[in-house]
Image (spheres, rainbow, N blue to C red):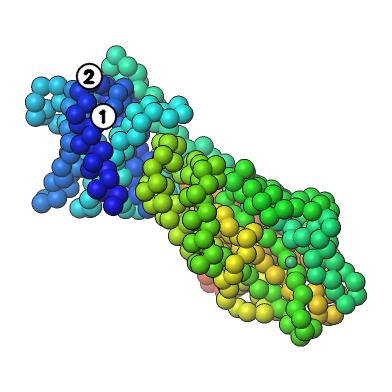
Amino acid sequence: MLSWLLASWALLWSSVSVAQNIENVRVWPSAEKTRVVFDLSAEPTYTYFTLFDNQPYRIVIDFQNTANQVDLSAIEIASDVVTVIRTSGSPRAGTSRIVLEINSATAPEIFPLGPSGNSGHRLVVDIAGATDLSQVVAESQSSTPATSAPRVPRTLDAIPIRPLVVAIDAGHGGRDPGSIGPAGNFEKVITLAVARKLAARVNADPGMRAVLTRTGDQSLSLAQRTSVVRRERADFFVSIHADAFTTPQPRGASVWILSKRRSDTELGRALENKERLSEELIDVVPSLENSEDDPYLNRTFLDMLRDNSMADGHEAATIILDQLGRVTNLHRDKPEGASFGVLSALRTPSVLVELGFISNPQKERLLINNSHQDRLANALYLGIREFFLRNPVAGTSLAELEIQTHVVARGESLSVIAARYGVRVADIKAQNNLRSNTIRVGQQLEIPLGR
Ligand SMILES: [Zn+2]
């Protein structure tokens, strides 16, 4: 459906005959694809074909009635998919032929976009294939030199380095106490205490920033809890609970993610709600702000984002469970799917953590214990951090961290240090050429972060 739609756009636009310029070329690599955006002075009139018979594989785009104002050799391409962008001999007067050399014979998706926000007319070329993002950030920061062309191209967009944003939701609050333990402790008090401890741990990490849905004893609507994710452009959402069970036996922690069925419902709702849709899609890719006009594109992009974030949520939940299992017993050792409205963010990996059942008298005592809350918060922090070390987000400072130096303190073992940084003991040993697990106080260790 999408390709048919785009083909019909191309036909429509090919009848327009306006002299135009290619003003800028931008390259956006990601873990899934590389997007090349041509900024144009008018609606593009173009045709394209692919040359996949021999290497290098090429995508050839002919822009009719178009002058190229960009020095393509000056563009630094930080993509593992697109290797070269160059001009080629013009097939006829007035046509600019641009060739993209790519490293696999993958059919591109090519479509025009009209003016929106700060962007004018564009032609977008998407080529599937992964780029190692840890290198992209560094490379894309070197700017493109200006050329002697009449129009000076804008520099290649640099990806700013930012901390990862972790949205932390303390369950219940205000008029809603949540579950109440046998000794009279309110769930809402425990969830807030652990949420604040987690926020403190997150904020102590230079690579992360915490946002709390509530910092005091307030009642929040579901919409207020979930809107934080979109407003703060959160990279992760964790909702904290300590619910009761009808019988006092269950005790352990568990981690929940949104079920596929509920997620489908949320996706349908988002597509029907224009405001939410524009929020969900607003910064998917900077050049797609106006895609909300097209229901097929919307569905495609939202579907893709949702599937990614659900897979990420499942992986994150698994890692968090592993960390929680080191400090408390688990009710179930695998993530579980449920229809929780609070997990309805379609773009952001979201998990709901049950710290333990407050209805169990023994667990209730633990849940109000300060040190136990510290351990739980630390386990959540380590889990989230490990998830992002395994799945680096381009442009975030955590993805930039490679090696961190750690000075061994009294009482620390290799496994303690490994757990603290969310890395494997074997990786620390390999990095430091350690043959045994023996380390000494004051010893400097290189901690290999990421990968
Ligand atoms: Zn609860």
The one nearer the camera, 210 or 403, is: 210
Residue occupying the far left of the picture: 92
Q: Residue at x 45, y 27 (%)?
A: 118
Res. 397 image quadrant: top right
Residue 337 picture location, percent across and down: 56, 71
Q: Which residue is mark 1?
A: 44
Beta carbon of the mark 1 residue lies under 8 A of ligand 1: no
Q: Position of residue 360 (x, y in %)?
A: 81, 80
Vertical placement of 31 versus 239: above or below?
A: above
Residue farthest to the top, as pictured: 150
Q: Is residue 238 left or right of residue 118?
A: right
Horizontal arrangement in the rendering, residue 99 relative to residue 372 (left or right)? left
Circle 2 is placed at which residue position? 19
Count the numbered circles shown: 2
Task: Check disc 2 and report its element: helix, strand or loop.
Answer: loop
Image position of 30 with respect to 187: above or below: above
Q: Going by the image, does 325 lie left or right of 6? A: right
The residue depicted at 75 percent of the width and 71 percent of the height is: 243
The residues bearing labels 2 and 1 have C-alpha atoms spaced at a distance of 9 Å
Residue at left offset 88%, top offset 69% = 185
Residue 132 vertical placement versus 156 (above, below)? below
Amino acid of disc 2: Ala
Q: Residues within 10 Å of mark 1 (few under 14, many from 20)?
A: many
Quadrant where ligand 1 appears: bottom right
